[in-house]
Image (cartoon, rainbow, N blue to C red):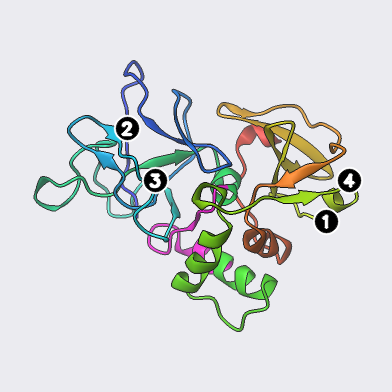
Amino acid sequence: MAAPSREREDAVPLQNRVDPFGAIHATPERALFTGNRGVIHDPATKTLLSRRWTTKAWIVCALAHPGGGRREPMGRNGPAGGAGWTELFFLDEVTALAAGHRPCFYCRRAAALSFRACFAAGNGMAAASAPAMDDILHRQRLAAGGTARTLSRAGLAAPPDGAVIEAGGLAHALRRGRALPWRFCGYGDPQPLPAGARLVTPPATVAALAAGFEPVWHPSAT
């Protein structure tokens, strides 16, 4: 669930931008989506705690909350002045999926229902509940200790559009048989597929993409 979150353009960036590997950075670039992993910040200092999640339910949300209202990023947004959940921000949905997040059933219900159906179909499940998806994804998230699968050049042809790979230490999103270099400000020019790479997006999410889930891309990907 997400309410609109705004930071002053001239403010010092907070450590709340997520890269495809699931790491959290301080950078001023804007984002298309927000989301959370529970409460992982100190509202007094607006800094991250040592933990990087308090729940397996890592979600990606709309910037605008359906019920309106506004949140102060890393502020006291919880009941009785508590921290509330920690707002994280993603370049686009492709980035959020690579980091191991899934669409929120509250503020992005249509996307969440589509993802759940594709997740079940792609992973050979009769049905996929939110807790079941979270359990599977949590074992595969790189930021939670998962291991990236190495892909050969031939294997690079298998992942669907929207999957993210790592080559030479850099993240690239796959689209139309090309690799788009990922940056916080957007994607670079399409490049030929590298000779070898590692799969960054959790395999279960890759299966959902292959089964037909269509993530939202940053405009630079076009």
Residue 87 covered by magenta stretch: no
Residue 14 drawn at (x, y percent): 35, 28
Is the C-beta separation of discs 3 and 2 under 8 Å? Answer: no
Q: Secondary structure at mark 1?
A: loop
Asked if 132 appears above or below 12 in the picture, the reply is below
Sequence order check, earlier mark of 3 and 2: 2
Asked if 108 appears above or below 175 in the picture, the reply is below
Depth-wise, is mark 1 or mark 2 nearer the camera? 1
Question: Given the image, on which type of amino acid does mark 2 rest?
Answer: Arg
Tag 4 residue: 153
Tag 3 residue: 52
Question: Given the image, on which type of amino acid does mark 4 rest?
Answer: Arg
222 or 127, which is in the foreground?
127
Sequence order check, earlier mark of 1 and 2: 2
The disc placed on residue 6 is 2
Question: Given the image, on which type of amino acid does mark 3 rest?
Answer: Arg
The CA span between labels 3 and 2 is 22 Å
Q: Quadrant of the C terminus?
A: top right
Q: Secondary structure at mark 2?
A: loop
Is the C-beta separation of discs 1 and 3 under 8 Å? Answer: no
Which residues, given as a range, are shown in magenta? Answer: 99-114
Question: Given the image, on which type of amino acid does mark 1 rest?
Answer: Ala
Within 10 Å of the Cα at label 2, are there few (<14), some (14-19), or many (20+) other Cα atoms? few
